[in-house]
Each structure stands twice: as structure tokens, then as C-alpha cells.
Image (tube, grey):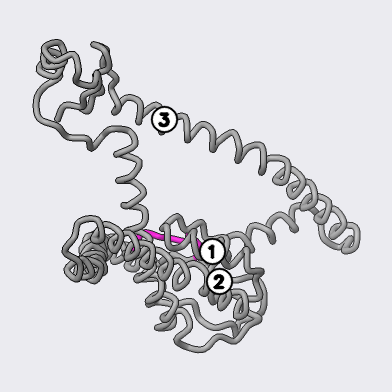
Amino acid sequence: MSHLVVRGRRINWTLVLVLGYLFYLLLGAMVFQLLEKQAEAQSRDQFQLEKLKFLQNYTCLDKQALEQFVQVILEAWEKGVNPEGNSTNPSNWDFSNSFFFAGTVVTTIGYGNLAPSTVAGQVFCVFYALFGVPLNLAFLNQLGKGLNAHLIPLERWVHKPGRARVVQTLALALFLTAGTLLFLVFPPMIFSYVEGWSYGEGFYFTFITLSTIGFGDYVVGTDPNKHYISMYRSLAAIWIVFGLAWLALVFNLGADLMEKFLQLKWHKPGTAEEAITKMEDDPDQPRIHIPS
């Protein structure tokens, strides 16, 4: 465990991190409840009102028949069948869509809007993910190393440490800026144009996808009223893979900075007792030490 020794008192930074993590979750729960609960209640009331209006307009139906029909619609939606349109809607399991689904499995995005319904498909999905998820992690790790390798040679052009630090900072800034434009700024423009979303909705989908959160409330290529090119979802899957590698590096950078901020990676030789003894022997030394 990592400790901070300040004037004889130990601060367990691992415990601080755990408590901070739990506090962050509690804070998120309270904010989401505050923002979403009232809107959910309004939507529920509006839905019940629409059902009552429907029964009033079509008196030949009773409430039980309507509830059964709603259940049929829900089951169809859970199986990936869009209730809108008719039987001529494009298949969810053509090659392009299947390729996109395979990508959401191995990347653990899992939108939840589409899943295998056959026993054979479910069994295959389990074993496919069992081997595919580690393969995807290894691929993203290697891809991340390749991206880092293009940043390291820039330092070889500079021999002085001060200038090397400046070049390294500029290279990191260029990497973050280019990646932000390529994976977070420009794609929402394309999705907004193709899907008819607002830019905010496109950006929301982009970040939720690349961070592998994958709620499934927004998914590309699922509107039955639109005609997509055959490779649209396959190209989106390729964009997701490279975007995942870039955003994973950004998240790792953020995690490293946070760990350093929490003193979790400040390694120095000696134990806590040795540090205290050394401070007593040399009062001019700073009264702070992080043991390895």
C-alpha cells in the first residue's frame, strides 16, 4: 500500500482513493436521480395517457388486448426487430450488421439493442467473447504501443533535456488534438448528417461508444426509414476500434496523472520508519516522504 508520512502520521492513499471512488459513485447517483427521475415520471404519465386516448378512439379494443399488443412490441424490440416499418426492413444479421455486432462483442461495448436469440448463437457468442475479448485487448495494447512509438522518435531530434521536454509536450499536445478532432469532433458531424441527429446527440453517441459504456439508446444504422450504404456499419466498426485505442491511451494518461496526484506512484527508497529516522537525523529535510 502507498502511504504518505507527514510529521509521524500516515495517510493511506489507497484508502483515500477507495473512499473517493465511492463518494464519486454516490455523487453521480444523486445527480442522475435529480436530473432524470422527474422526466421519467412525466414520460410514464404521458404513456399512460396515450394508452387511454387510444382505447377511447378504438372502443373495440379492451385494456387487456392493448397490454398484450404492447408486450408483443416489447418482445420484438428486445429481439432486435424495430416495430416501425414492415417486413421489408433490412435484416439486422446481414454481413455488415453482423460485423458491427461482432465488434461490439469483443470490445465489450454491448449496446443491448441486438443480441443472438437462438441457443446456438448464444453459445457461440459466449465462446467468441471468451477468446475475442483478450484478443481485442492485446490488439488495442499493441496498437497503443504503435501510436506511442511515433511520438518517441521526436525526442531523438533534440539532445538538450530542456528542449526535449518542450518537444515531448508539443508532441503530446499534437497527439491529443489530432485524436480529438479525428475521433470526437468530426465523426459526430457525419453521424448527425446520416442519422438525422443533432450534433450533441452525435457527440454523445461517439463518446459513449468509444468509452465502451454503450447504453444502446443511440446506435448507428438502425433507422428503418433510412437507406444506408452496405458498408456503413462496417466502417463504423473500424472507426470504433481505432477510436478505442486512442481513447484508451487518453484514459490511461488521465489515470496516471490521477495516481501521481494521489501520491500512488511516488516511489522512493526506504521504509516509513527509515524515513522518519532520517528526518529526525536531518531536520533540514522536508517532513514528507512516500515509501516504495
Residue 188 - label: 2
Q: In this view, does 192 lie to the left or right of 254?
A: right
Whether residue 97 is in magenta: the answer is no
- Mark toward the start of the polypeptide (1 vs 3): 3
Label 2 sits on what residue type?
Pro
Residue segment shown in magenta: 107-113
Name the residue: 10% across, 30% down. 269
Give the percent coordinates (x, y) of residue 205. Answer: 54, 64
Examine the residues drawn in magenta and state their main secondary structure.
loop
Per the image, label 3 sits on a secondary structure element best described as helix
Distance between the alpha carbons at the discs numbered 1 and 2: 8 Å
* Above or below: residue 231 compared with residue 93: below
Q: Between label 1 and label 2, give the one nearer the viewer.
A: 2
Identify which residue, 224 or 57, lies in the foreground.
224
Name the residue: 79% across, 50% down. 48
Other-residue count near label 2 (Cα within 10 Å), few / some / many at <14 / 14–19 / ≥20: many
Identify which residue, 227 or 93, lies in the foreground.
227
In which image quadrant can residue 285 be found? top left
Residue 127 seen: no
Name the residue: 49% across, 76% down. 92
Label 1 sits on what residue type?
Phe
* Above or below: residue 233 compared with residue 163: below
Q: Mark 1 points at which residue?
A: 205
Q: Name the residue under label 3.
A: 20
Give the percent coordinates (x, y) of residue 124. Answer: 28, 66
Per the image, label 1 sits on a secondary structure element best described as helix
Distance between the alpha carbons at the discs numbered 2 and 3: 33 Å
Give the percent coordinates (x, y) of residue 21. Answer: 41, 33
